[in-house]
Image (spheres, helix red, strand yellow):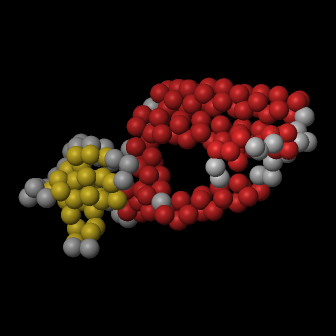
Amino acid sequence: MSVRDLANIDLSSLVAGIQWWQLVVAIVVVVVGWVIGHFARKGVVAVFTRAQALPDVYALPVARLVEYLIIALAIGLGLAVLGANIQPLLAVVIIVAVIAVLVLRGTADNFAASVLIQSRHPVREGDEIQVETPAGAVIGTITELNARSVILVTTDGRTVHVPNAKLLGDAVVNHTSHGARRS
């Protein structure tokens, strides 16, 4: 399509059937959605700041996700007010969501497990734990808890990454949870 073709497009045919009040309502819906999204982002950050059980590392990504979802919903509602057929858009969103769920399934399991680990504190940094691996039992000290795994350092200097879902799903022996240990 050339520039001349674009210049010759009759805009009145594109907006035929759309009344001025529909346009105003659509704009108001999008603006209100944007404002609600902004305040929702601030609210989510405030909840993560106040709730001591929720790790602060997740505050910003979750807050952004909530804001973007609200804005996307507002844009969809604005298009619906204008009379646009949003069924193809919904189909694309559903297909993308299903693909994302299938691709991120393992990552989501570990992420959810990390939230439980960091909120319930079955283990903490500095704890000496024993976990089962394909090579046998491994005993190590926790040096880091992240969104994907628990990182252990063994007495012989090896670093072991235990997926969070495995840590919650399997039996774990915590040698330092009570502070006193007999040998």
* Quadrant hosting residue 76: top right
Extreme front residue here? 4
In-image side of 36 versus 16 (left or right): left
Residue name at image x 87 percent, y 34 percent: 22
Residue 15 visible in image: no
129, 107: nearer the viewer:
107
In-image side of 177 versus 183 (left or right): right
Residue name at image x 34 percent, y 59 percent: 163
Residue 60 visible in image: yes
Residue name at image x 43 percent, y 58 percent: 107
Extreme left residue here? 156
109, 74: nearer the viewer:
74
Q: In which quarter of the image is the C terminus?
A: bottom left
154, 147: nearer the viewer:
147
Q: Which x, y percent locates residue 34? A: 66, 30
In-image side of 146 versus 88 (left or right): left
Question: Vertically, is 181 above or below 170?
Answer: above
11, 134: nearer the viewer:
11
Q: How many labels does the image show?
A: 0
In-image side of 37 versus 25 (left or right): left
Q: Which x, y percent locates residue 134? A: 26, 73
* Quadrant hosting residue 158: bottom left
Residue name at image x 80 percent, y 40 percent: 11
Question: Vertically, is 18 above or below 134?
Answer: above
Q: Which x, y percent locates residue 109? A: 46, 58
